[in-house]
Amino acid sequence: MVVKNNSKSYEHIIPSIQEWPITHFSNDRDAFLERLIEFTMERLKSSNHEVNDLLSKSIYLERQRVKNNPWSVDPGDEKMYWKSMVKELDATETLDNPEIARHKLLRRIVNRYSEEITGFFAPKTFRFARHFLNAFFKRLFNNGWGRGHKGIWGSRSELRSKIKVDGYVDEIRELFKHGTVVVVPTHFSNLDSIMIGFGIDSNVGIPAFSYGAGLNLYDYEILAYFMNRLGAYRVDRRKKNPIYLETLKSMASLSLVEGLNHIFFPGGTRSRSGAIEDKLKLGLLNSVIDAQRYCILNDIQQKIFVVPVTLGYHFVLEAGSLIDQHLRQEGRDKYHRNNTKTSMFRIVWGFLRSLRKNDSEVYLSFGCPMDVLGNNVDRNGNSFDDRQSPVDIKKYFSKENIPNADAQRESVYTRILADRIVSSFKKENIVLSSHLCAYSAFKFLQEKNPEMDLYEVLRVPVKNFNIKYSGFKDKCQAVINELQGITEMDVKFSEVFDQTIDEIIDDGIKNLGVYHQKKVLKWTDKEIIGSEDFKLLYYYHNKLTHYELSSNK
């Protein structure tokens, strides 16, 4: 199926930013923090851990973190704070009623974590970011060469045509009337959060979402300034202690219950290989299940919807470092890293020069909305199973028709939801011309060196790699034919696939890794195709490895 470019401009479902759910949440932040502290305390008290054990373990792990893995973004009083916690906890041993004192210590730590984690949203900053990103993305996705000053920056309509939206957009807009929406995207680039936020604002017309941001990113002052004011909540992956983990999970769950829409990256981090994630982190997904169960147990009429989104780029700016990390992790001693480094000045200059000469595009493919059990839902929020029979999700959180909590049962639900999200990623992925060319070329490289493993292939001198166009053309056509023959899903292709195979290949080579310094694929003459970087070629080749193609088996 060829996807037609949807450049339709949707009106915002809530025109006034002051009326957005995230704005109301931010205005209520202080009161929410009090509710979050009580919510987390109840969770911790009802756990199977003694308060003294929780405190001892958490304080120990925090002192180890401060000692062995400090960050400049950490509060200045970290070392002294946790040292004083040790003294105060020890002092409770001599009290007549140590449990009261320990609960007070627990509350103080939960309060500290709640303040750290919970984000804030400033409409004024959002308006500035909206205008800035309009200008930035107009430049990034528009070739203005030779069109004067205005041409360099492009127009809003041109930008809208470069950000291509596909899928269940109308249904998602309607779901905002019926509950809380959680967008779960694939994750390839540091641009993803910005790209999704911009796309849903400019093209889809729905309010801003809250999203998680690694605390390490707050080390950059400009990033910290905007993330602190654009709804990001902070996630510190160094902190593995039970009090922090429960506070983080409680923040996600309670805010979902109270109607705050979220973006969760279920893969947890960017895909290092370039392939679509097939193993998701279950922690935040479990908070979605947890929030829905809480609503049912407390008779709160709030349904939570999960919307998978598959991102498609012709380029990922950090692809070189990502694939390097992947190969080092997977190959270990088999992978010989090239230690030559390029200066930051040359990297930035090369990017800016390429920015002026090239254009590109990005795809946001919205999958069918689901409930927290992975059942498809219609635009009115009604759930249906695989046979299209209506589903009452309350029954799945009940025993003998009485709503109850069951951690083991809900862990199974979380895995089911993760599997459904992965299936949606693969189904809704849009095949781009650049990914077709990279896949075909890398398979050519492997077939030319059948006796070599992956790491040996990557060490083949790039000057030895030349593909005759006639053979490359046949290879690309064979891959297209095989993709079209997949019966398990209706594979989606970008609109360029309506054109001839020669035009598809020309578009793919032109767009493949367009902003990289080295050409992933290039014409060495009229009939020969070569490459300047096999690692990048392998990275973009991986965009199609999730399909059941004969060459992937």
Image (cartoon, rainbow, N blue to C red):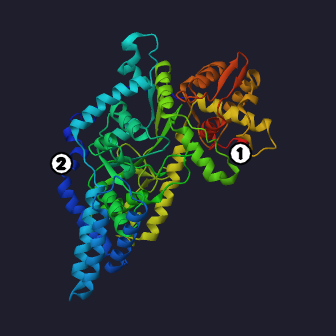
Q: Are marks 2 and 1 in contact (CB under 8 Å)?
A: no
Where is residue 5? Give x, y as percent. 47, 25
Give the Cα distance between marks 2 and 1: 54 Å
310 left or right, relative to 177: right
194 left or right, relative to 339: left
In front: 176, or 132? 132
Residue at horizontal 67 percent and vertical 46 percent from the top: 336
Res 321 quadrant in image: top right
Instruction: Give the number of marks.
Output: 2
Judged from this view, the residue extending furthest toward the right is 451
Q: Quadrant of the N terminus?
A: top right
Where is residue 68? Give x, y as percent. 43, 63
- Rendered position, 340 above or below 408: above
- Rendered position, 415 above or below 85: above
Name the mark on residue 412.
Answer: none
Residue 65 visible in the shown view: yes
Residue at horizontal 25 percent and vertical 58 percent from the top: 115
Which amino acid type is shown beneath numbered disc 2? Asn
Residue labelled with disc 2: 27
**Mark 2 Cα within 10 Å, few/some/many (few <14, many 20+)?**
some
